[in-house]
Image (tube, rainbow, N blue to C red):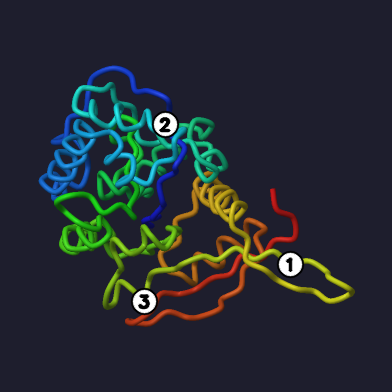
Amino acid sequence: MLVLLPPSEGKAASGAGVPLALDELSLPGLSAARGTVLNALVELCSGDADTAQEVLGLSKGLRGEVARNAELRTAGALPAGEVYTGVLFDALGLAKLDEAAYRRAERSLLVFSGLWGALRIGDRIPPYRCSMGVKLPPLGALGAYWRREMASVLPSAAGDGLVLDLRSSAYAAAWKPTGELTARTATVRVLQEREVDGVLKRSVVSHFNKATKGRLVKDLLNAEAEPASPGELVDALLGLGYRVEVSAQGSARKPWQLDVVVTDVH
């Protein structure tokens, strides 16, 4: 099973230990592309801070991220699983997994990134700020840039098993499974069901969507679940107490679409 995750806007305040070593990151087929994006980002942030802030889409409160980006080559690095601190990763709780579950997380989780393309949670990186939606001079839109680079690398990482795609739309644009791989890919939508004026209604949740997906992955890891297909994933989630419905079966043109229905959001 390969689980595709978005990164988080929230990141650790600083790294520790030795700086980044690009050639030690997983998915070595992306190394050259990572170096190209890193060089472009450092150059941007080493120049006019106002321009960099605008290009990166940073608020005034995050202006300090420009200076931090300029020092990415020498900044201390942390495992990616410790760098990302947003809602999904808080709910996933990597630091609280037992040793066996954490090893499964290292094998199965792949975090997408505007700067790094895609990472395993054990890859050591410095905290950074660069989303997939950025148009980075001179490379242009990072989603399109990474789509070209990942086309030849990601299929082998996916292997011949299930792909569970939990990415947001911006990061999903960076790589889409094709052909038979699409038919064994499952996406998940989180719906809240509640009673309104005596009628049950469903709505898509946003913030709590991330927390639910984080808990879902955590529960699969803790249960030693290794579903090999979307159908087996449905069975595994039902066994874990989730309310899951298949809204669309997959094919060579579209992935499976699963709805996880919740009544409480937290």
The answer to whether marks 3 and 1 mark residues whose Cβ atoms lie closer than 8 Å is no
Please tell me how crowded label 2 is: few (under 14), some (14-19), or many (20+) other residues with Cα within 10 Å: many
Picture coordinates of residue 227, whole percent (x, y): 45, 61
Of labels 3 and 1, the one closer to you: 1
Q: Residue furthest right?
A: 198
The label on residue 32 is none
Residue 229 image offset from top left, x and y in percent:
42, 68
SS at circle 1: strand
Q: Residue furthest top?
A: 17
Q: Is 153 on the left or on the right of 100, as rendered?
A: left
Secondary structure at numbered mark 3: helix
**Residue drawn at 49 percent across, 72 percent down:** 231
Task: Estimate the spatial distance between the alpha carbons at disc 3 and disc 1, rounded to whole Å.
Answer: 28 Å
Residue under pointer 3: 183
Q: Secondary structure at mark 2?
A: helix
Q: Which residue is mark 2?
A: 82
Q: Is residue 33 above or below residue 168?
A: above
- Quadrant position of the N terminus in the picture: bottom left
Instruction: Report the residue at 50% width, 33% height from top.
Output: 98
* Disc 3 to disc 2: CB gap under 8 Å: no
- What residue sits right under mark 1 in the picture? 193
Q: Compared with residue 190, is residue 51 higher up or lower down, i.e. above or below? A: above
Name which residue type carries label 3. Answer: Ala
First in sequence: mark 3 or mark 1? 3
**Which residue type carries mark 2?**
Glu
Which residue is farthest left? Answer: 32
Q: Nearer the viewer, mark 3 or mark 2?
A: 2
